[in-house]
Image (cartoon, rainbow, N blue to C red):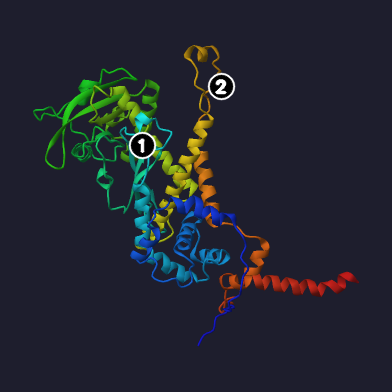
Amino acid sequence: MSSPSYNTQQQEVWQEMDRSDEDWNELVVSRLPADLESKAIELKAWSRQREVRSIRDLLRALLVLAAWGYSFQRLAMWATLKGIAHMSEGAWRKRLQQSAVWIAWLLCELLSVQDAPSWLESGRQRANRILLIDATRLSIPGGTGDDVRLHWSYDLLSGRTQEVAISDRHHAEGLGWFKLQAGDITVTDAGYPVGSTVAIVLKQHADAVTRTTVSHLRLETENGERIDLKSRLKRQPYGKARHIMGWVNAPDGQRYQVRLVAYRLPKEVAVQAQERKRQRLRQKRGKNFNQELVWWAGWILLITTLPLESWSDEEVAQLYRARWQVELVFKRLKQGLNWHGVSIKDWDHLTTLVQLKLIVWCLQEQEQLWMREQLSQLIQVPQRDWDEANLEQDETTDQWVISSWLLTQQCLQDLSMLLRGRWSRQYLQCCLPLLQRYLLSRKRRKRTHQETTSRTWLIQKLARLMPSNAA
Protein backbone atom coordinates (compact mmCIF):
# COMPACT_ATOMS: atom_id res chain seq x y z
CA MET A 1 0.00 0.00 0.00
CA SER A 2 1.47 3.35 -1.03
CA SER A 3 1.99 6.06 1.53
CA PRO A 4 1.67 9.81 0.93
CA SER A 5 4.84 11.86 0.65
CA TYR A 6 3.40 14.71 2.70
CA ASN A 7 2.26 15.08 6.29
CA THR A 8 -1.39 14.04 6.58
CA GLN A 9 -1.72 14.77 10.29
CA GLN A 10 -4.31 17.47 10.94
CA GLN A 11 -2.98 20.47 12.79
CA GLU A 12 -4.89 23.09 14.68
CA VAL A 13 -4.39 26.46 13.00
CA TRP A 14 -5.29 29.56 14.91
CA GLN A 15 -7.83 31.67 13.05
CA GLU A 16 -6.82 35.16 11.98
CA MET A 17 -9.36 37.93 11.71
CA ASP A 18 -9.86 39.12 8.15
CA ARG A 19 -12.04 42.11 7.35
CA SER A 20 -12.72 40.70 3.88
CA ASP A 21 -14.82 37.91 5.42
CA GLU A 22 -17.25 40.46 6.81
CA ASP A 23 -17.24 42.41 3.55
CA TRP A 24 -17.95 39.21 1.63
CA ASN A 25 -21.15 38.68 3.60
CA GLU A 26 -22.13 42.34 3.65
CA LEU A 27 -21.31 43.46 0.11
CA VAL A 28 -21.59 40.30 -1.99
CA VAL A 29 -23.78 37.69 -0.31
CA SER A 30 -26.43 40.29 0.45
CA ARG A 31 -26.80 40.95 -3.29
CA LEU A 32 -27.23 37.28 -4.19
CA PRO A 33 -30.63 35.55 -4.45
CA ALA A 34 -32.26 34.74 -1.13
CA ASP A 35 -32.72 31.08 -2.07
CA LEU A 36 -29.04 30.61 -2.91
CA GLU A 37 -28.43 27.87 -0.35
CA SER A 38 -31.70 26.00 -0.90
CA LYS A 39 -31.03 25.94 -4.65
CA ALA A 40 -27.54 24.56 -4.03
CA ILE A 41 -29.09 21.60 -2.20
CA GLU A 42 -31.87 21.18 -4.74
CA LEU A 43 -29.49 21.25 -7.73
CA LYS A 44 -27.06 18.75 -6.11
CA ALA A 45 -24.22 21.23 -5.71
CA TRP A 46 -24.28 20.57 -1.95
CA SER A 47 -25.15 17.01 -1.01
CA ARG A 48 -23.14 16.83 2.21
CA GLN A 49 -20.67 19.07 3.96
CA ARG A 50 -17.56 16.88 3.92
CA GLU A 51 -14.69 19.35 4.37
CA VAL A 52 -16.12 22.62 3.00
CA ARG A 53 -17.52 24.74 5.80
CA SER A 54 -20.64 26.14 4.12
CA ILE A 55 -22.39 26.76 0.81
CA ARG A 56 -21.29 30.38 0.85
CA ASP A 57 -17.66 29.33 1.23
CA LEU A 58 -18.06 26.93 -1.68
CA LEU A 59 -19.34 29.75 -3.88
CA ARG A 60 -16.55 32.06 -2.73
CA ALA A 61 -13.93 29.46 -3.59
CA LEU A 62 -15.35 28.97 -7.08
CA LEU A 63 -15.45 32.74 -7.66
CA VAL A 64 -11.82 33.00 -6.57
CA LEU A 65 -11.00 30.31 -9.13
CA ALA A 66 -12.58 32.48 -11.85
CA ALA A 67 -11.53 35.95 -10.69
CA TRP A 68 -7.84 35.12 -10.18
CA GLY A 69 -7.45 32.49 -12.89
CA TYR A 70 -6.17 29.95 -10.38
CA SER A 71 -5.36 26.35 -11.11
CA PHE A 72 -7.06 23.80 -8.87
CA GLN A 73 -3.80 23.34 -6.98
CA ARG A 74 -3.59 27.05 -6.17
CA LEU A 75 -7.28 27.04 -5.29
CA ALA A 76 -6.65 24.22 -2.82
CA MET A 77 -3.82 26.23 -1.25
CA TRP A 78 -6.02 29.32 -0.96
CA ALA A 79 -8.86 27.34 0.63
CA THR A 80 -6.41 25.92 3.16
CA LEU A 81 -5.09 29.36 4.07
CA LYS A 82 -8.64 30.71 4.46
CA GLY A 83 -9.69 27.74 6.57
CA ILE A 84 -12.48 26.86 4.13
CA ALA A 85 -11.33 23.33 3.34
CA HIS A 86 -8.18 21.22 3.22
CA MET A 87 -8.76 19.15 0.08
CA SER A 88 -6.80 18.01 -2.94
CA GLU A 89 -7.03 19.69 -6.33
CA GLY A 90 -8.91 16.67 -7.63
CA ALA A 91 -11.57 17.12 -4.96
CA TRP A 92 -12.02 20.76 -5.96
CA ARG A 93 -12.37 19.73 -9.59
CA LYS A 94 -15.21 17.41 -8.62
CA ARG A 95 -16.83 20.20 -6.62
CA LEU A 96 -16.83 22.38 -9.72
CA GLN A 97 -18.42 19.63 -11.79
CA GLN A 98 -21.14 19.05 -9.20
CA SER A 99 -21.91 22.78 -9.06
CA ALA A 100 -22.39 23.23 -12.83
CA VAL A 101 -26.20 23.44 -12.80
CA TRP A 102 -26.20 25.64 -9.68
CA ILE A 103 -23.71 28.06 -11.26
CA ALA A 104 -25.83 28.31 -14.42
CA TRP A 105 -28.92 29.05 -12.32
CA LEU A 106 -27.09 31.76 -10.35
CA LEU A 107 -25.92 33.50 -13.51
CA CYS A 108 -29.46 33.55 -14.90
CA GLU A 109 -30.74 35.01 -11.63
CA LEU A 110 -28.15 37.78 -11.55
CA LEU A 111 -28.97 38.77 -15.12
CA SER A 112 -32.75 38.64 -14.75
CA VAL A 113 -33.21 40.44 -11.41
CA GLN A 114 -32.19 44.02 -12.23
CA ASP A 115 -33.62 47.36 -11.23
CA ALA A 116 -33.30 50.63 -13.09
CA PRO A 117 -30.30 52.70 -11.95
CA SER A 118 -31.26 55.61 -9.75
CA TRP A 119 -29.31 58.12 -11.85
CA LEU A 120 -31.72 57.66 -14.75
CA GLU A 121 -34.42 60.29 -14.78
CA SER A 122 -37.74 59.13 -13.39
CA GLY A 123 -39.34 59.70 -16.75
CA ARG A 124 -36.73 57.46 -18.44
CA GLN A 125 -37.01 54.48 -16.12
CA ARG A 126 -39.72 53.01 -18.30
CA ALA A 127 -38.11 54.08 -21.55
CA ASN A 128 -37.13 51.67 -24.27
CA ARG A 129 -34.01 49.64 -23.76
CA ILE A 130 -31.23 50.35 -26.26
CA LEU A 131 -29.72 46.87 -26.63
CA LEU A 132 -26.28 46.72 -28.24
CA ILE A 133 -25.98 43.10 -29.38
CA ASP A 134 -22.83 41.41 -30.55
CA ALA A 135 -20.66 38.34 -29.95
CA THR A 136 -17.04 37.94 -28.88
CA ARG A 137 -14.74 34.98 -29.28
CA LEU A 138 -12.53 32.96 -26.95
CA SER A 139 -9.95 30.37 -27.88
CA ILE A 140 -8.77 27.10 -26.35
CA PRO A 141 -5.28 25.55 -26.63
CA GLY A 142 -4.83 24.03 -30.08
CA GLY A 143 -8.15 25.43 -31.28
CA THR A 144 -9.14 27.65 -34.18
CA GLY A 145 -9.33 30.90 -32.20
CA ASP A 146 -13.12 30.88 -32.51
CA ASP A 147 -13.86 27.95 -30.21
CA VAL A 148 -16.18 29.71 -27.72
CA ARG A 149 -18.65 32.45 -28.57
CA LEU A 150 -20.25 34.74 -26.03
CA HIS A 151 -23.48 36.23 -27.42
CA TRP A 152 -23.90 39.50 -25.54
CA SER A 153 -26.77 41.93 -24.99
CA TYR A 154 -25.74 45.26 -23.40
CA ASP A 155 -28.20 47.97 -22.36
CA LEU A 156 -26.69 51.32 -23.31
CA LEU A 157 -29.00 53.40 -21.06
CA SER A 158 -28.34 51.52 -17.81
CA GLY A 159 -24.77 50.59 -18.72
CA ARG A 160 -24.91 46.88 -17.87
CA THR A 161 -25.29 43.42 -19.31
CA GLN A 162 -28.79 42.13 -19.97
CA GLU A 163 -28.26 38.63 -21.34
CA VAL A 164 -25.36 36.33 -22.21
CA ALA A 165 -25.41 33.05 -24.14
CA ILE A 166 -22.51 30.62 -24.59
CA SER A 167 -22.03 28.51 -27.71
CA ASP A 168 -19.32 26.93 -29.83
CA ARG A 169 -18.24 28.21 -33.24
CA HIS A 170 -20.85 26.13 -35.03
CA HIS A 171 -23.69 28.38 -33.81
CA ALA A 172 -24.05 31.65 -35.69
CA GLU A 173 -24.82 35.09 -34.33
CA GLY A 174 -28.46 36.09 -34.24
CA LEU A 175 -31.20 37.70 -32.19
CA GLY A 176 -32.67 34.27 -31.46
CA TRP A 177 -30.34 33.99 -28.47
CA PHE A 178 -32.18 36.78 -26.62
CA LYS A 179 -35.63 37.61 -25.29
CA LEU A 180 -36.82 41.06 -26.31
CA GLN A 181 -39.44 43.25 -24.68
CA ALA A 182 -41.97 45.47 -26.39
CA GLY A 183 -40.36 48.80 -27.24
CA ASP A 184 -36.76 47.54 -27.24
CA ILE A 185 -34.36 48.89 -29.86
CA THR A 186 -31.65 46.47 -30.95
CA VAL A 187 -28.45 47.70 -32.60
CA THR A 188 -26.36 45.10 -34.44
CA ASP A 189 -23.53 44.98 -36.95
CA ALA A 190 -23.36 43.38 -40.39
CA GLY A 191 -22.90 39.89 -38.92
CA TYR A 192 -26.65 39.62 -38.24
CA PRO A 193 -28.82 38.68 -41.27
CA VAL A 194 -31.28 41.41 -42.19
CA GLY A 195 -34.32 39.23 -42.90
CA SER A 196 -34.26 37.18 -39.70
CA THR A 197 -33.37 40.24 -37.58
CA VAL A 198 -36.34 42.23 -38.88
CA ALA A 199 -38.72 39.28 -38.48
CA ILE A 200 -37.66 38.61 -34.86
CA VAL A 201 -37.94 42.21 -33.64
CA LEU A 202 -41.30 42.90 -35.30
CA LYS A 203 -42.84 39.71 -33.93
CA GLN A 204 -41.81 40.80 -30.43
CA HIS A 205 -43.01 44.41 -30.96
CA ALA A 206 -39.49 45.79 -30.87
CA ASP A 207 -37.36 47.72 -33.38
CA ALA A 208 -33.98 47.17 -34.98
CA VAL A 209 -31.05 49.08 -36.40
CA THR A 210 -28.68 46.73 -38.20
CA ARG A 211 -25.83 47.38 -40.57
CA THR A 212 -25.71 45.58 -43.90
CA THR A 213 -23.72 45.50 -47.11
CA VAL A 214 -24.87 45.77 -50.68
CA SER A 215 -23.71 42.19 -51.30
CA HIS A 216 -26.04 40.80 -48.63
CA LEU A 217 -29.05 43.07 -49.15
CA ARG A 218 -31.89 42.68 -51.60
CA LEU A 219 -34.20 45.66 -51.18
CA GLU A 220 -37.38 45.37 -53.23
CA THR A 221 -40.31 47.52 -54.16
CA GLU A 222 -43.79 46.58 -53.03
CA ASN A 223 -44.24 44.74 -56.34
CA GLY A 224 -41.14 42.58 -55.73
CA GLU A 225 -38.75 44.36 -58.13
CA ARG A 226 -35.18 44.81 -56.95
CA ILE A 227 -34.16 48.41 -56.20
CA ASP A 228 -30.94 49.61 -57.85
CA LEU A 229 -29.28 51.30 -54.88
CA LYS A 230 -26.28 52.77 -56.67
CA SER A 231 -28.36 54.62 -59.23
CA ARG A 232 -30.36 56.25 -56.44
CA LEU A 233 -27.41 57.13 -54.20
CA LYS A 234 -24.53 58.01 -56.52
CA ARG A 235 -25.36 61.73 -56.50
CA GLN A 236 -25.65 61.97 -52.73
CA PRO A 237 -23.22 64.49 -51.14
CA TYR A 238 -20.47 63.39 -48.77
CA GLY A 239 -21.32 63.48 -45.06
CA LYS A 240 -25.08 63.28 -45.64
CA ALA A 241 -27.72 60.62 -44.93
CA ARG A 242 -30.90 59.81 -46.81
CA HIS A 243 -33.38 56.96 -46.76
CA ILE A 244 -35.08 54.59 -49.21
CA MET A 245 -38.22 52.70 -48.26
CA GLY A 246 -38.42 49.10 -49.40
CA TRP A 247 -39.24 45.52 -48.58
CA VAL A 248 -37.05 42.60 -47.49
CA ASN A 249 -37.72 38.87 -47.49
CA ALA A 250 -37.42 36.91 -44.23
CA PRO A 251 -36.67 33.20 -43.68
CA ASP A 252 -40.25 32.69 -42.46
CA GLY A 253 -41.50 33.40 -45.99
CA GLN A 254 -42.96 36.82 -45.23
CA ARG A 255 -41.99 40.26 -46.52
CA TYR A 256 -41.44 43.23 -44.21
CA GLN A 257 -41.29 46.92 -44.99
CA VAL A 258 -38.11 48.62 -43.77
CA ARG A 259 -36.19 51.84 -44.17
CA LEU A 260 -32.70 51.83 -45.63
CA VAL A 261 -30.63 54.68 -44.19
CA ALA A 262 -27.64 55.33 -46.45
CA TYR A 263 -24.97 57.53 -44.87
CA ARG A 264 -22.09 58.62 -47.07
CA LEU A 265 -18.94 59.16 -45.08
CA PRO A 266 -17.15 62.52 -45.23
CA LYS A 267 -14.84 62.69 -48.23
CA GLU A 268 -11.52 62.26 -46.38
CA VAL A 269 -12.88 59.38 -44.31
CA ALA A 270 -14.47 57.75 -47.37
CA VAL A 271 -11.22 57.91 -49.36
CA GLN A 272 -9.31 56.26 -46.50
CA ALA A 273 -11.94 53.53 -46.12
CA GLN A 274 -11.93 52.85 -49.86
CA GLU A 275 -8.14 52.59 -49.92
CA ARG A 276 -8.16 50.08 -47.05
CA LYS A 277 -10.81 48.07 -48.86
CA ARG A 278 -8.82 48.16 -52.10
CA GLN A 279 -5.69 46.85 -50.37
CA ARG A 280 -7.57 44.00 -48.69
CA LEU A 281 -9.24 42.96 -51.93
CA ARG A 282 -5.95 43.12 -53.81
CA GLN A 283 -4.28 40.88 -51.23
CA LYS A 284 -7.19 38.43 -51.32
CA ARG A 285 -8.22 38.46 -55.00
CA GLY A 286 -5.18 39.80 -56.81
CA LYS A 287 -5.56 42.42 -59.54
CA ASN A 288 -8.99 41.25 -60.67
CA PHE A 289 -11.31 42.32 -57.85
CA ASN A 290 -14.75 43.91 -57.82
CA GLN A 291 -14.40 47.69 -57.98
CA GLU A 292 -18.00 48.10 -56.86
CA LEU A 293 -17.02 46.88 -53.40
CA VAL A 294 -14.41 49.64 -53.19
CA TRP A 295 -17.01 52.30 -54.01
CA TRP A 296 -19.43 50.98 -51.37
CA ALA A 297 -16.67 51.10 -48.72
CA GLY A 298 -17.37 54.82 -48.44
CA TRP A 299 -20.93 54.16 -47.23
CA ILE A 300 -22.71 52.97 -44.11
CA LEU A 301 -25.92 51.12 -45.00
CA LEU A 302 -28.40 50.66 -42.15
CA ILE A 303 -31.70 48.80 -42.16
CA THR A 304 -34.15 50.00 -39.51
CA THR A 305 -37.75 49.53 -38.49
CA LEU A 306 -37.84 52.75 -36.46
CA PRO A 307 -40.55 55.20 -37.57
CA LEU A 308 -39.33 58.17 -39.58
CA GLU A 309 -41.53 60.54 -37.57
CA SER A 310 -39.60 59.75 -34.34
CA TRP A 311 -36.13 58.91 -35.64
CA SER A 312 -34.61 60.91 -38.48
CA ASP A 313 -31.98 59.45 -40.79
CA GLU A 314 -29.18 61.32 -38.99
CA GLU A 315 -30.41 60.09 -35.60
CA VAL A 316 -30.45 56.48 -36.81
CA ALA A 317 -26.86 56.87 -38.01
CA GLN A 318 -25.87 58.42 -34.69
CA LEU A 319 -27.56 55.57 -32.79
CA TYR A 320 -25.58 53.03 -34.77
CA ARG A 321 -22.32 54.78 -33.88
CA ALA A 322 -23.09 54.01 -30.22
CA ARG A 323 -22.84 50.30 -31.06
CA TRP A 324 -19.08 50.61 -30.53
CA GLN A 325 -19.72 50.71 -26.77
CA VAL A 326 -20.35 46.96 -26.71
CA GLU A 327 -16.93 46.43 -28.31
CA LEU A 328 -15.42 48.46 -25.47
CA VAL A 329 -17.28 46.25 -23.00
CA PHE A 330 -15.56 43.21 -24.53
CA LYS A 331 -12.19 44.92 -24.24
CA ARG A 332 -12.77 45.85 -20.60
CA LEU A 333 -14.00 42.31 -19.88
CA LYS A 334 -10.96 40.59 -21.37
CA GLN A 335 -8.45 43.06 -20.01
CA GLY A 336 -9.94 43.28 -16.52
CA LEU A 337 -10.28 39.51 -16.05
CA ASN A 338 -7.14 38.71 -18.09
CA TRP A 339 -9.46 36.63 -20.23
CA HIS A 340 -8.36 36.21 -23.84
CA GLY A 341 -8.84 32.46 -23.98
CA VAL A 342 -9.80 29.39 -21.96
CA SER A 343 -7.15 26.80 -21.04
CA ILE A 344 -9.66 23.94 -20.85
CA LYS A 345 -10.83 21.61 -23.62
CA ASP A 346 -13.65 19.73 -21.88
CA TRP A 347 -16.82 21.58 -22.96
CA ASP A 348 -18.85 21.05 -19.76
CA HIS A 349 -15.97 22.12 -17.55
CA LEU A 350 -15.23 25.05 -19.86
CA THR A 351 -18.86 26.25 -19.85
CA THR A 352 -19.01 26.24 -16.05
CA LEU A 353 -15.78 28.22 -15.77
CA VAL A 354 -17.04 30.78 -18.31
CA GLN A 355 -20.27 31.15 -16.33
CA LEU A 356 -18.26 31.73 -13.15
CA LYS A 357 -16.30 34.51 -14.82
CA LEU A 358 -19.55 36.05 -16.02
CA ILE A 359 -20.88 35.95 -12.43
CA VAL A 360 -17.77 37.87 -11.34
CA TRP A 361 -18.45 40.37 -14.13
CA CYS A 362 -22.08 40.80 -13.03
CA LEU A 363 -21.03 41.40 -9.42
CA GLN A 364 -18.51 43.94 -10.67
CA GLU A 365 -21.24 45.70 -12.66
CA GLN A 366 -23.38 45.99 -9.52
CA GLU A 367 -20.51 47.63 -7.66
CA GLN A 368 -19.78 49.85 -10.66
CA LEU A 369 -23.39 51.08 -10.74
CA TRP A 370 -23.11 52.11 -7.11
CA MET A 371 -19.80 53.92 -7.66
CA ARG A 372 -21.11 55.63 -10.79
CA GLU A 373 -24.09 56.89 -8.84
CA GLN A 374 -21.84 58.32 -6.13
CA LEU A 375 -19.55 59.97 -8.67
CA SER A 376 -22.51 61.41 -10.58
CA GLN A 377 -23.57 63.25 -7.44
CA LEU A 378 -20.07 64.65 -6.94
CA ILE A 379 -19.69 66.05 -10.46
CA GLN A 380 -23.28 67.26 -10.79
CA VAL A 381 -23.56 70.94 -11.76
CA PRO A 382 -25.49 72.97 -9.12
CA GLN A 383 -29.02 73.95 -10.12
CA ARG A 384 -29.24 77.70 -10.76
CA ASP A 385 -31.29 80.10 -12.80
CA TRP A 386 -30.46 80.20 -16.49
CA ASP A 387 -29.35 83.85 -16.48
CA GLU A 388 -27.19 83.33 -13.42
CA ALA A 389 -25.62 80.26 -14.97
CA ASN A 390 -24.77 82.19 -18.13
CA LEU A 391 -23.17 85.03 -16.19
CA GLU A 392 -21.08 82.79 -13.96
CA GLN A 393 -20.33 80.04 -16.49
CA ASP A 394 -17.02 78.38 -15.74
CA GLU A 395 -15.30 76.81 -18.73
CA THR A 396 -14.22 73.81 -16.67
CA THR A 397 -17.55 73.24 -14.91
CA ASP A 398 -18.82 70.31 -16.93
CA GLN A 399 -15.58 69.00 -18.44
CA TRP A 400 -15.38 66.02 -16.08
CA VAL A 401 -16.68 62.64 -17.23
CA ILE A 402 -16.56 59.22 -15.59
CA SER A 403 -13.97 56.89 -17.09
CA SER A 404 -15.57 53.48 -17.61
CA TRP A 405 -12.15 51.90 -18.13
CA LEU A 406 -10.73 53.06 -14.79
CA LEU A 407 -14.00 52.42 -12.98
CA THR A 408 -14.15 48.83 -14.25
CA GLN A 409 -10.52 48.20 -13.33
CA GLN A 410 -11.05 49.55 -9.83
CA CYS A 411 -14.22 47.55 -9.21
CA LEU A 412 -12.71 44.32 -10.52
CA GLN A 413 -9.62 44.81 -8.39
CA ASP A 414 -11.66 45.55 -5.28
CA LEU A 415 -13.92 42.54 -5.86
CA SER A 416 -10.98 40.22 -6.51
CA MET A 417 -9.18 41.36 -3.36
CA LEU A 418 -12.38 41.00 -1.34
CA LEU A 419 -12.83 37.42 -2.58
CA ARG A 420 -9.24 36.43 -1.97
CA GLY A 421 -8.74 38.06 1.42
CA ARG A 422 -5.37 38.38 3.10
CA TRP A 423 -3.28 36.81 5.87
CA SER A 424 -0.17 37.66 7.82
CA ARG A 425 3.23 36.04 7.54
CA GLN A 426 2.82 34.53 10.98
CA TYR A 427 -0.41 32.86 9.89
CA LEU A 428 1.24 31.61 6.69
CA GLN A 429 4.04 30.07 8.73
CA CYS A 430 1.47 28.36 10.93
CA CYS A 431 -0.20 26.85 7.84
CA LEU A 432 2.98 25.54 6.21
CA PRO A 433 2.54 21.98 7.58
CA LEU A 434 -0.79 21.83 5.72
CA LEU A 435 0.53 23.50 2.58
CA GLN A 436 3.42 21.12 2.01
CA ARG A 437 1.14 18.64 0.22
CA TYR A 438 0.70 21.26 -2.51
CA LEU A 439 4.22 22.70 -2.55
CA LEU A 440 6.30 19.49 -2.51
CA SER A 441 6.82 17.19 -5.48
CA ARG A 442 8.33 13.73 -5.72
CA LYS A 443 11.98 13.38 -6.69
CA ARG A 444 12.28 12.49 -10.35
CA ARG A 445 13.48 9.00 -11.10
CA LYS A 446 14.55 9.21 -14.73
CA ARG A 447 16.20 12.61 -14.60
CA THR A 448 17.41 14.84 -11.83
CA HIS A 449 15.86 18.06 -10.65
CA GLN A 450 18.30 20.54 -12.15
CA GLU A 451 17.76 23.38 -9.68
CA THR A 452 18.21 21.20 -6.59
CA THR A 453 21.18 19.35 -8.07
CA SER A 454 22.95 22.55 -9.15
CA ARG A 455 22.41 24.23 -5.81
CA THR A 456 23.70 21.20 -3.88
CA TRP A 457 26.78 20.95 -6.08
CA LEU A 458 27.60 24.67 -5.69
CA ILE A 459 27.20 24.55 -1.91
CA GLN A 460 29.62 21.61 -1.71
CA LYS A 461 32.01 23.26 -4.14
CA LEU A 462 32.10 26.54 -2.22
CA ALA A 463 32.48 24.67 1.07
CA ARG A 464 35.65 22.98 -0.22
CA LEU A 465 37.04 26.33 -1.35
CA MET A 466 36.45 28.07 1.96
CA PRO A 467 39.60 26.76 3.81
CA SER A 468 41.92 27.74 0.96
CA ASN A 469 40.40 31.21 0.77
CA ALA A 470 40.73 31.67 4.52
CA ALA A 471 44.41 30.66 4.37
Three-letter amino acid code of the residue under disc 1: Arg
Earlier in the chain: of badge 1 and badge 2, it is 1
Q: Which mark is residue 396?
A: 2
Contact flag, marks 1 and 2 (Cβ < 8 Å):
no
Question: Residue 451: image x %, image y %?
Answer: 64, 69
- 158 to 360, vertically: above or below: above
> Relative to 71, is 260 on the left or the right?
left
Q: Residue at x 37, y 55 (%)?
A: 106
Residue 156 visible here? yes
- Element on which disc 1 rests: helix
Question: Residue 198: image x %, image y %?
Answer: 21, 36
Question: Residue 416: image x %, image y %?
Answer: 52, 52
Q: Quadrant of the C terminus?
A: bottom right
Residue on which disc 1 sits: 280
Residue 146 visible here? no
Q: Quadrant of residue 447?
A: bottom right
Of residue 30 and residue 335, the one placed in the foreground of this image is 30
Q: How many marks?
A: 2
User: What crowding class fits label 2: few (fewer than 14 Cα within 10 Å), some (14-19), or many (20 or more)?
Assistant: few
User: What crowding class fits label 1: few (fewer than 14 Cα within 10 Å), some (14-19), or many (20 or more)?
Assistant: few
Of residue 140 and residue 13, the one placed in the foreground of this image is 13
How far apart marks 1 and 2 lie (CA) works out to: 44 Å
- 363 to 49, vertically: above or below: above
- Element on which disc 2 rests: loop
Question: Residue 329: image x %, image y %?
Answer: 42, 41
Three-letter amino acid code of the residue under disc 2: Thr
Q: Which mark is residue 325?
A: none
Q: Quadrant of residue 35?
A: bottom left
Q: Quadrant of residue 38?
A: bottom left
- 218 to 151, vertically: above or below: above
Mark 1 or 2, which is nearer the eye? 2
